Amino acid sequence: MNRLAYSVILLCNLITLMSCEPTSYSREGITHRLATVRCIGGKAMLCYDPTSATGTVSGSLDNFSTTADMDRFKLNDGDRGIAQISYKDIPADNVFSNVLDRFDVIKLNELNWNRYEQDSLGTYLHFNVMHIDSYASYTGLWNNGHIACAIVTYYPDPSTPSDRNKIDMYLHGFRNDTLSLLVTATVPESDYSQPAKDALLQYDLSTLRTSNSETANEIIGLMDGLLTAERDSFYLEVTTCDSLEIDNRGHHRIIPGDRMYTKVPFDF
């Protein structure tokens, strides 16, 4: 399994709040999930990111259901991160426990509000899959509400300081019902033969409405004009440059770029 830029290793199974196994079945363990903290009507809960096998699921835990619980964990509404949850299901003894052990907040990335000079040729990177276990994974591009997430892989020179390797996401336009973002890599001495690095990217798309970016203002104007109450969502496209330069032990070639899509609620 590849390493993530944020040193996040997701383990174990998806949290299951209800079991349909025979009453003789029991299990207990620890699971980790990407999630957003939510507080609705004074009730605290976690909204779990969808995986390749499940949709977005929300729920409170035995020790995480009130604003006092949020304060105890030093969490705020909208915080994003990794939830570590201990679970115990023993139907024969009527024991069903789901407890939040910890929540490690991950700061969201910021869109690059500048205009990218060209989108025809870029450094090689590709979308990837982040596995939790053999039953669940996050695939390439997904969203939790209007939080957009992507996993991309790049190939940096191990001797290059990590802060010189940058992944940027630019506004790329809005057409019909699709918001397009352009992901680019600035990776000195990139080479496919070098150890791969994975980057978990997370963006709050509602910042399009609150930014001072001229491009964002133009796009929000288009979205307000085209998306109505009958059309309350849009497609998000994350695309690489049209063509990508890839080096492999001195062999240079150019390959086609790639893109992925997810559907996002227009609630901002």
Image (cartoon, grey):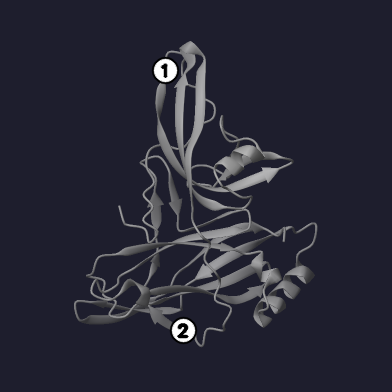
Vertical comparison of 2 with 11: above or below: below
Where residue 14 sits in the image (x, y, percent)?
A: 45, 38
Classify mark 1: helix, strand or loop.
loop
Where residue 193 sits in the image (x, y, percent)?
A: 22, 70
Q: Residues within 10 Å of mark 2 (few under 14, many from 20)?
A: few
* Residue 25, disc: 1
Camera-nearest label, 2 or 1: 1
What whole-number distance in Å separates the C-alpha atoms at marks 2 and 1? 56 Å
Q: Residues within 10 Å of mark 1 (few under 14, many from 20)?
A: few
Left/right placement of residue 103 relative to residue 175 reads left
Classify mark 2: helix, strand or loop.
loop
**In the current view of this chain or complex, which residue is farthest to the left?**
249
- Residue type at numbered disc 1: Tyr
Residue at point 71% right, 43% down?
40
Using the image as rendered, state which of residue 242 and residue 147 is in the foreground. Answer: 147
Name the image quarter holding residue 24. top left
Left/right placement of residue 182 relative to residue 38 reads left
Res 74 seen here:
yes
Name the image quarter holding residue 265. bottom right
* Residue 97, disc: none
Vertical comparison of 62 with 152: above or below: above
* Sequence-wise first label, 2 or 1: 1
* Residue 120, disc: 2
Using the image as rendered, state which of residue 18 and residue 72 is in the foreground. Answer: 72
- Residue type at numbered disc 2: Ser
Left/right placement of residue 179 relative to residue 166 reads right
